[in-house]
Amino acid sequence: MGLRTLAKTTRIANTYIITRPSQAYTTAIGAYNVFAIRGGPILITLLGGVEQAVNGAEDLDITINGTATDAAGAVAINGGVGWPWVTTLNVLGTLINGAQAVPLTPALLHPKGFICGLTTTYWTAGLPAYVTCTFATGVSWTGEIFMKYRKLSPYSYVRLV
């Protein structure tokens, strides 16, 4: 294996973390595209957020490129300031909202992750795949959203929307 191939392979194997800064998300708007995936597929291994202001009750549903990240639909994420939530990345699971901490066990979180490819419209019209958070019931939620992923192509990248 040549140095160039080794360097490219090492770069692809790296884990990346992208964080969307804290903002208020309202039920009136509903669906927010929070991350855009372009260039190639990625493997998402963690997707969650942390509440930074108490705004009342709020339920959240998440899709990745149009596919649900869990089976439950919209789940409450309004625990309190500092409370994290995490999607299980498992269509048989339920989004988890924890009191100051969430254990990431194989029973709760899909241990292999969630692969996101690109749609036909990416190749024909340049439209990316989106991680979409739909704030379904309540008034609003304020906090930051984060995602940990690996590139499955040297051309893959993720940006804030």
Image: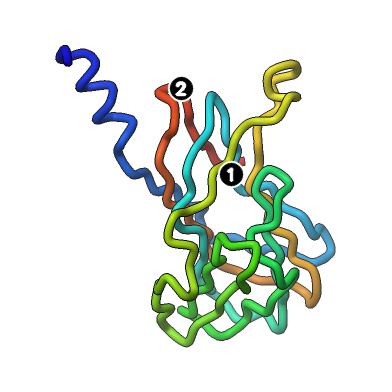
Can you tell which quarter of the image residue 53 is in? bottom right
Badge 2 element: loop
- Left or right relative to 46: residue 121: right
Coordinates of residue 159 in the picture (x, y in percent): 53, 37
| Rendered-image quadrant of the N terminus | top left
Coordinates of residue 121 in the picture (x, y in percent): 75, 24
- Which residue does the image show at 40% across and 41% down from the upper left? 150
Coordinates of residue 52 in the picture (x, y in percent): 52, 73
Estimate the spatial distance between the alpha carbons at disc 2 and disc 1, rounded to whole Å: 16 Å
Where residue 155 is drawn, which disc sits there?
2
15 in relation to 79, above or below: above
- Which residue does the image show at 63% across and 48% down from the upper left? 131
Where residue 35 is drawn, which disc sits there?
1
Can you tell which quarter of the image residue 142 is in? bottom right
Mark earlier in primary sequence (2, 1): 1
- Which residue does the image show at 69% across and 53% down from the upper left? 63
Which amino acid is tagged 1? Phe
Coordinates of residue 118 in the picture (x, y in percent): 63, 31
Which amino acid is tagged 2? Tyr
76 in relation to 40, above or below: below
Please tell me how crowded label 2 is: few (under 14), some (14-19), or many (20+) other residues with Cα within 10 Å: few
Please tell me how crowded label 1 is: few (under 14), some (14-19), or many (20+) other residues with Cα within 10 Å: many
| Rendered-image quadrant of the C terminus | top right
Can you tell which quarter of the image residue 128 is in? top right
Where residue 79 is drawn, which disc sits there?
none
